[in-house]
Image (tube, rainbow, N blue to C red):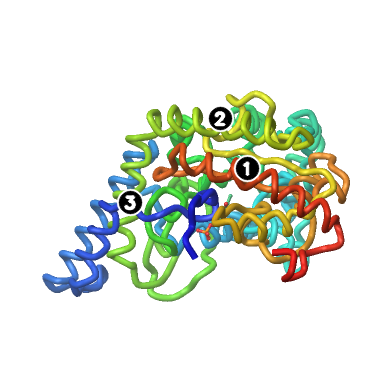
Amino acid sequence: MRVSAYLDHAATTPVLPEAAAVLAEHLSRTGNPSSLHASGRAARRVVEESRERVAAALGARPSEVLLTGGGTEADNLAIKGLFWARTAQDPARRRVLVSAVEHHAVLDPAFWLAEHAGAEIVLLPVDDEGRVRLDVLRDELAAHAGTTALVSVMWANNEVGTLQPLAEVVSLARARGVPVHADAVQAVGQVPVDFAASGLDALTVTGHKVGGPVGVGALLARRDLPLVPVLHGGGQERGVRSGSLDVPAIAAFAVAVERAVEAREETARRLGGLRDALVAGVRAAVPGAVLRGPADPADRLPANAHFTFPGCEGDSLLYLLDSAGVECSTGSACQAGVPQPSHVLLAMGLDESDARGALRFSLGWPSTDEDVAALLAALPGVVERARAAGLAGRPRAGAL
Ligand SMILES: Cc1ncc(COP(=O)(O)O)c(C=O)c1O
């Protein structure tokens, strides 16, 4: 079937042609960067140059870039690695403070630690726009800094696009000597991300949201940050992340990060304009639609728009739009197909039935006016049919 509009770039975005070319070029070369012969040394050079490029683009030092197999792995290393290291230094540090709207790649390792390693999870509440409550963080740290292992608050939310007040989060935690991790998977290439300037201790980035391949990413981690490895083996990446390095993917990842950051201002301007047109168009086409996340466009990712459609099941909307050639998401791609209301929307105070009518539209480097026009042409009919199907679940095949 012909796709007339791909509006799910927050799930994954096409590989940039330049990154694809670099990937292909390196696929036909041999050499493990850990090998000492000429081919190994050549592969090592590619890895170290790529590391330097990623570091320069994100305001980090090359030695702070730990290459991983993507965002999920980097988040797991940050949460588990930091928790294990901090409790090894002082067993009293069992509290893990995470915002209630984190991606499952942060929430699930935290809850795993609670189940298997004695962690105490504190879910930091958010306001109705999805912004973490700084007053609660302040009080938590004032009362329990000595028993807190880490704080993790994402740079930008993957569902509703909310930008978090990270500077304030960092200054509150730093004043109490507690390290902070941020998942910046959705932020890189859309808003300025500078690791050194942020004051963060660790930051997650992944390739496939910025025009690189899937399965490669990095945890930026300060040199003095204690981290216990999640993966043990050959001792690569400062001994923190063992496993032979994926040279083609790393080279393509570096190009993609570099390009995404170079083009950021122009991308944000162009996609922000397109997003504003999409939001205005959806509101005009479906008067009952409710924009979720920040009301002020400056407080959300420029490529994100998120709505709830009262009386509709998000899954119904998604499948009906899909059959019209318009691809979007009900929220996190990792949850698609699981018919549960989004934990992000529930944390923002929506009730279950409102939360079930959610759709996220996300733009990316190839997005055009035509994509938005295709959505707006299909949407009114789709909403009408989804409303008729109600909240009973997916529409029957006949309804598609
Ligand atoms: C905010 C956020 N963190 C982490 C991830 C996981 O990254 P990856 O798909 O590279 O494992 C995603 C992907 O959906 C994400 O949106």
Residue at which label 1 appears: 157
Q: Amino acid at mark 2?
A: Ala
Residue wearing tag 3: 16
Question: Viewer-proximal residue, 5 or 73?
Answer: 5
* Residue placed under numbered mark 2 in the picture: 277
Residues at marks 1 and 2, CA–CA distance in whole angstroms: 21 Å
The quarter of the rendering in which ligand 1 is drawn is bottom right
Looking at the image, is mark 3 or mark 2 nearer the viewer? Answer: 2
Q: Secondary structure at mark 1?
A: loop
Report if the beta carbon of the residue with label 1 is closer than 8 angstroms to ligand 1: yes
- The tag earlier along the polypeptide, 3 or 2, is 3
SS category of the residue bearing label 2: helix
Q: Residues within 10 Å of mark 2 (few under 14, many from 20)?
A: some
Q: Quadrant of residue 364?
A: top left
* 286 with respect to 249 (left or right): right
Which residue is at 62% across, 38% downward?
Answer: 305
Q: Amino acid at mark 1?
A: Asn
Question: At x 66% / y 52%, what residue is drawn?
Answer: 331
Q: Is residue 179 left or right of residue 115?
A: left
| Mark 1 crowdedness (10 Å alpha carbons): few <14, some 14-19, many ≥20 | many
Residue 114 in the image: above or below residue 152:
below
> Mark 3 falls on what kind of element?
loop
Q: Disc 3 and disc 1: Cα gap in Å?
A: 23 Å
